[in-house]
Image (spheres, rainbow, N blue to C red):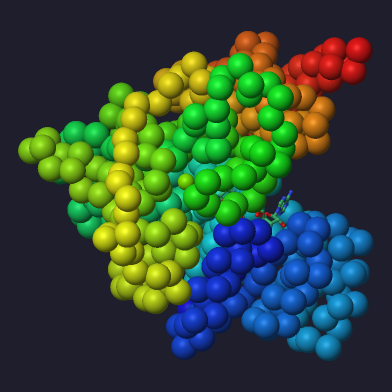
């Protein structure tokens, strides 16, 4: 019986994780659940899974939750220190890192430093502080298993002995597939007027709003390129993005002998979640078996960097190294939030990020403090750009 902490239990990944966990009450016991503000949903999950601890974002949310589950033995806490504590507690073996954005960094790092088995959905943490995070995983003998569907696919297509050196086992390229999102075929000159709801209508996946906008700009793929770099030790030139609108192949590894290994499946995050949860075993995830005879055809294209400038910005940030990916990530979070609040347009997202990258110099990333300081500077610069654009739009 393994204890699990789910950081971000009320999100899309959190809900899919609970769905898989509920299928295997003999294997997993829920130690702790966290949510930011969706108290009623967290209360319902506490009622079903009876965790020892539940953590929310504020004192008010904690008081609301405590009132809703007063009859349960679950202890209610709030704040970042409590998140780090449930991620590193001796009572948990597995930590699902499914908080969205930079807010997930501290607890995910705490799990690494406590040597936990980490199921990593929160790609932003790795993008911000890849070297420091991977060092902590190695130093504290944590186990890092990718949940992002592409990285989980690559993980499955690599040999079990893979030790982050592509050349050592004949890996030529990592082929990261991308659906292209909702705007793959929309006229480029009409993208300025798309709404947040249109951007969040992903053709194949149901996800949280931030990652949905990231998929529409393809910044999600850009962040995933950086994520793949850290997880698999591949330089930017060995990572290739391939547009595959059907999202049936979740990514591939190309080997020097000409072989290409792919992982296929229905687009449902319960598959990579179950794979990471039970690794190296296999468990039922609730996902239907793939019916290949029902596939109309699988297509593959090269990405258009002019349609998707965010993808190019991410490759540039990876090549620049140091704090550049943290700057990119922070500015993107600000820009996406501003777009979701309708303060800027869709095409302004890459403008805001470019502005932040232009005005905040990047440098080495020797410590988490240095990364967080650059994150704060990038947010301030992005906020300025958003204000300028928003006041121009109002006029
Ligand atoms: P979501 O918006 O549905 O859920 C986010 C979760 O994080 C919620 O539980 C929320 O309460 C919590 N949260 C939000 N802000 C917080 C804060 N400031 N402090 C603490 N908790 C906070 O997002 P999601 O789609 O489930 O994505 C979660 C993560 O997984 C993201 O990093 C995303 O990139 C990654 N991911 C998601 C998918 C997917 O299919 N949804 C696929 C691959 C990777
Ligand atoms: Mg993904």
Can you say whether 127 is above or below 386 in the image? Answer: below
In the figure, is residue 306 to the left or right of 5? left
Q: 28 or 85: which is nearer to us?
A: 28
Q: Report x, y in % for residue 3.
A: 53, 77
Can you say whether 76 is above or below 133 in the image? Answer: below
**Image quadrant occupied by the C terminus:** top right
Instruction: Look at 52% across and 46% down and name the residue there.
Output: 203
Q: Report x, y in % for residue 206.
A: 58, 54
Q: In which quadrant of the rendered view does residue 324 lie?
A: top right
Instruction: Look at 71% across and 42% down and name the residue there.
Output: 197
In the figure, is residue 161 to the left or right of 274? left
In the figure, is residue 352 to the left or right of 117? right
Asked whether residue 189 appears in the rendered view, the answer is yes
Can you say whether 61 is above or below 50 in the image? Answer: above
Q: Report x, y in % for residue 392.
A: 85, 12
Q: Tag count in the figure? A: 0
Instruction: Look at 61% across and 76% down and name the residue there.
Output: 31
Q: Residue furthest left?
A: 257
Q: In which quadrant of the rendered view does residue 76 lie?
A: bottom right
Q: Report x, y in % for residue 288.
A: 40, 70
Asked whether residue 140 appears in the rendered view, the answer is no
Q: 1 or 236: which is nearer to us?
A: 236
């Amino acid at each position: 019986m393994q204890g699990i902490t789910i950081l971000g239990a009320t999100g899309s990944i959190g809900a899919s994780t609970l769905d898989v966990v509920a299928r295997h009450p003999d294997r997993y016991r829920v130690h702790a659940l966290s949510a930011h503000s969706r108290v009623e949903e967290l209360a319902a999950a506490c009622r079903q899974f009876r965790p020892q601890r539940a953590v929310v974002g504020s004192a008010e949310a904690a008081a609301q939750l405590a009132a809703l589950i007063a009859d349960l033995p679950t202890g209610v806490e709030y704040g970042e220190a409590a998140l780090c504590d449930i991620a590193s507690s001796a009572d948990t073996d597995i930590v699902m890192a499914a908080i969205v954005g930079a807010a997930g960094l501290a607890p995910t790092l705490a799990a690494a430093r406590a040597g936990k088995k980490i199921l990593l959905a929160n790609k932003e943490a790795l993008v911000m502080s890849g070297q420091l995070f991977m060092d902590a995983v190695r130093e504290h003998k944590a186990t890092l298993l990718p949940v992002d569907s592409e990285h989980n696919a690559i993980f499955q297509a690599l040999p079990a002995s893979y030790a982050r050196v592509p050349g050592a086992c004949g890996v030529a390229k990592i082929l990261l597939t991308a659906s292209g999102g909702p705007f793959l075929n929309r006229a480029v000159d009409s993208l300025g007027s798309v709404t947040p709801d249109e951007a969040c209508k992903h053709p194949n996946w149901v996800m949280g709003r931030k990652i949905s906008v990231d998929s529409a700009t393809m910044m999600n793929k850009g962040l995933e390129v950086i994520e793949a770099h850290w997880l698999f030790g591949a330089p930017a030139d060995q990572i290739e993005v391939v547009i595959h609108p059907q999202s049936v192949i979740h990514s591939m590894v190309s080997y020097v002998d000409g072989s290409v290994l792919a992982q296929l499946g229905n687009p449902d995050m319960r598959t990579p979640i179950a794979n990471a949860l039970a690794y190296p075993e296999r468990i039922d995830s609730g996902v239907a078996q793939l019916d290949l005879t029902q596939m109309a055809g699988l297509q593959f294209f090269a990405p258009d960097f002019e349609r998707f400038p965010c993808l190019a910005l991410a490759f540039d940030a990876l090549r620049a190294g140091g704090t550049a990916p943290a700057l990119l990530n922070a500015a993107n979070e600000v820009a996406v939030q501003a777009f979701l609040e309708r303060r800027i347009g869709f095409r302004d997202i890459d403008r805001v990020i470019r502005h932040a990258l232009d005005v905040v110099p990047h440098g080495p990333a020797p410590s988490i403090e240095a990364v967080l300081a650059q994150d704060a500077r990038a947010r301030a610069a992005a906020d300025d750009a958003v204000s300028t654009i928003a006041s121009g739009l109002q006029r």
